[in-house]
Image: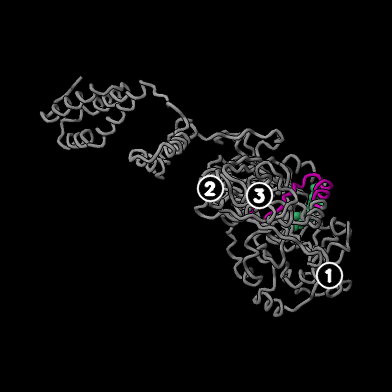
Amino acid sequence: MLGGEHTPQCLLLLTRVRRMLSRTEHRGVCRLLSSVMSGTESHTDREEDYRFLHSMLMEKKLHLLFKIHERLKRFEKRSPIPVQEHAASLASDLAEELIHQGWSDEVKELVALFSQPHFKSLLSVHDTVAQRDFEPTLPPIPDDVLDEDEDSVKIVSLVKTNEPLGATIKKDKSTGAIVVARIMRGGAADKSGLIHEGDELKEVNGISLEHRKPKEILPLLACSKGEVKFKIIPASFKEEMASNKKKLFLRALFDYDPDDDPAVPCKDAAIGFKRGDVLQVVSMEDDTWWQACHLRDGNARGGLIPSRQLHERRVALQRPQALFRPRRVKPPDEGEVMEDVDYSALTGIHIAGLRRSFRLGRKSSRAREAARRRRWSTGVHGPTRPPTYIEVIPYHRDPKERHRLVVLVGPDGVGVNELKRRLLLSDPDHYGVTVPHTTREKRRQEKEGVDYHFVSVPMFEEDILNHRFIEYGRYNGHYYGTSLDSVNRVMAEGKVCLLDVHPGKIKHVYTCEYKPYVVFVKPPGIEELRLTRRRAKFICGEEDKGSVRVFSEEDFEDMISLADDMESQCGHLFEKVIVNGDIAMAFRELKADLERVEQTEVQWLPAEWMCSSPTKARRSCGHLDSWI
Ligand SMILES: Nc1ncnc2c1ncn2[C@@H]1O[C@H](COP(=O)(O)OP(=O)(O)OP(=O)(O)O)[C@@H](O)[C@H]1O
């Protein structure tokens, strides 16, 4: 058994331990210690190992434990049974009888012994052990607990002493239910760990608490002795969270389906969600998998969701996909050269104020080519954080309050203007658009304040310096811009203001004051683009002198990759994504969605809007990084 070199002390020690083990009657302990010994024998040639082993095995407490263990084992073998189970009552009966026997010294001593509190307690403990009355017994599950209640109803049995239970109760004003308001530290309820703040009390000792007032319930508790049985509906996760810390609601900015996730620790324990769903987070203890529940499920259980870090990691590790291969097409014919950017020239419909947005920065062909080459060579769009979750808080809109500002964004030519135009035509009294500012000359048919606000260059530049513009640009040597005041004017009329801006400019209105509802208009896949835009024409950028032409394959490519860039950089700001394939369908979806937003009683707004004043928010809008 022994291998390797050992010091003489070590050998001596091992022999002593073996002798000790051989005396031990319990083979399990012997085997355990023998295996410890054999496992350490090959290391006992070092002095410090010897000392360690010695101190461990020669420890007095260890030897005492062995002794106790041996005694118990011997005792167990004899299988003792109690001579009788009611020693306490027998002792008191005996004491009474002895009194009638006359007062000899022995009798006096025995009666005095029987009346000692310690002796009485000893006999009572003896009886409890003899009757095996020390194991907890669960009460039977009441018959009236329905199957669907199984998860939510809890039967709690507490032994009540003279002490109070250590809990306060109150009537919930909205539901009328009796709930536990407070649990006192160190009280019986607290020590049991079975009753919590927010738990709903349904019954006490089989008596229903329905329609009872707290003051009617207190006597029920006061008069019950010994075991008190409660029927409880435990506080939901929501209430537990509320009692512990601030509730945390997140809006998901991506779709998640546990069935498509091979890495989820347990599919059944996870919950799926769609972009835009609001989730209540109940635990963020784990860095990789958080626990959350859907708000729409009333009594929801928490389920696993990927943490922000996990989702970001996954997106970063995704292999970039080639979106499409460009197809060689005939260069498009040059269209009519426009004198100005007038939407009505394209659509044939003139609506005052409905102008093309000032997204005049369509890339020059050289810049576009460079960007494309970069994309094809690397296939990535830079180190941006992918959209994951944004913290939101509930908002109840007062009907007297202004409507939320509707901001439409999307890559050039995707159809933002077309959707805006259709909305406006569908209900001109309800929707409104801003009147832009320009420094160009007023034309004969144009009206000040209807088509444009015509201002001088110095005035326009002063407004730029005073941060009055959400967006501005130069076109054909003139300034054009959309001011915050023009948005305020539409909103003050009680209309839903439709604004289309570059996503980079959303920050100017991303405040509690405007509560923007940002809709991202996304192009469909390349095939659908080719199919749906066959006859569509669009206005080219300044470089092409605002010419109107049909879409080229390059335009489609730009549109899709620009949409991708926008989504990865500003996706956290988008509350709705609409894919504009078929224009009629896209319009219907947008209209229905905007109506839903207006009618929804509780809306979920970014938490950051609520914690800063409008001016402060506007000032701080340069760093929109609070999504988590
Ligand atoms: N789903 C669609 N199917 C077919 N044609 C469409 C669709 N959406 C938009 N169009 C057409 O595409 C052209 C460009 O649309 P629109 O002017 O609305 O783009 P935009 O996003 O406002 O871009 P820009 O700001 O660069 O003008 C228009 O002729 C429009 O009618």
Residue farthest toward the top in the current orientation of the protein: 1
Residue 531, given in percent of the width and then of the height, sits at: 79, 41
Q: Earlier in the sequence, mark 3 or mark 1?
A: 3
Of 512 and 155, nearer the camera is 155
Q: Is residue 194 left or right of residue 202?
A: left
- Say if mark 3 contacts mark 2, CB within 8 Å: no
Mark 2, residue position: 161
> Going 58% across and 59% down the picture, which residue do you hit?
626
Cα–Cα gap, marks 3 and 1: 61 Å
Query: What's the coloring here?
Result: one colour
Q: Is residue 433 above or below residue 2?
A: below
x then y, percent, for residue 384: 56, 52
Between disc 1 and disc 2, the foreground one is 2
Q: Nearer the viewer, residue 6 or 82?
A: 82
- Where does label 3 land, which residue? 220
Taking the magenta stretch, the answer to whether it contains residue 165 is: no
Amino acid type, mark 2? Thr
* Element carrying mark 3: helix
Instruction: Give the Cα separation between the discs numbered 3 and 2.
Output: 15 Å
